[in-house]
Image: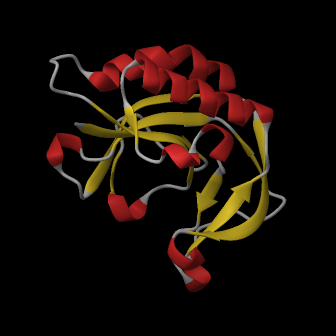
Amino acid sequence: MRNLILVAFVEPVADGLVFPRSEWPLHITLVRFDADASAGADPAAALAAAADATARAALGATLLIGEDAGFGRGGSVPVSLVEPDPALQALHEDLVRAVEDLDGRILTPHHTLSGYRPHVSHRGAGPEVKRLHPGDAVVLDRIALVDMAPDGDRTIRRILRLWSLPDSS
C-alpha cells in the first residue's frame, strides 16, 4: 500500500519538495488515503490524473479562517478552523470520489464528506508557533498530492504533484 494525502498548502511550496514529517508547511488536509501499489500501475499518477480538472477548477477560491479549536485526543492538537465554504467542500467531495473510484482506502472515513472539518494545524509552540488567526483570509492557490513515505521512508514527505496559480510559487 502507498500512503498518500491531498492537501491545500497555505505556505509557499515547490513541486517535488521533500520535508521532514515534523516540518509540514501549513496546510488544509483534503483527503488522506492508501492506494494499492501492487498492481503494477502507479496509483499516485492515476490519482493525479483523476484529480487534475477538480484541483485546477478549485484554484483561486478565498477561504476565511475561523475560531481556534483542539483536535485529537483530549483536544491536544491546536488548530485554526476554516469557515464552511462551498468551493472547499466541493473540492473535498470530488477528491474523495476520485480516491474511491481508484479503489483507494480513506484512512479517516468519519472525517470525510458530511464529517469533513477543514482546519490548519498549528506548528510549533510558544512565540515561535506557526499558525493562522481568526479572520485571516487565504487563497486556495496550492493543492498538492503528497507521498507520506517516499521510497518507504516514513520520516519524510514528498510533494508528487502540485497544482498552483501562476504567481503562488
Q: Is residue 166 visible?
A: no
Q: Position of residue 13 (x, y in %)?
A: 48, 44
Identify whether 42 is placed above or below 11. above
Q: Is residue 104 visible?
A: yes
Q: Residue furthest front?
A: 110
Identify whether 21 is placed above or below 12. below
**Count of marks overlaid on the render:** 0
Q: Is residue 18 left or right of residue 130?
A: left
Snapshot colouring: secondary structure
Quadrant in which the N terminus appears: top left
Q: Is residue 138 left or right of residue 108?
A: right
Question: Which residue is at 16% across, 46% downward?
Answer: 152
Residue 55 is drawn in which quadrant? top right
Give whichever of 90, 159 is nearer the camera. 90
Residue 47 is drawn in which quadrant? top left
Q: Is residue 130 left or right of residue 60?
A: left
Give whichever of 49, 136 is nearer the camera. 49
Q: Position of residue 70 (x, y in %)?
A: 63, 72
Q: Position of residue 57 (x, y in %)?
A: 66, 19
Quadrant in which the C terminus appears: top right
Q: Residue furthest right?
A: 135
Q: Position of residue 153 (x, y in %)?
A: 18, 51
Q: Is residue 36 left or right of residue 61?
A: left
Question: Which residue is at 36% across, 23% downward?
Answer: 103
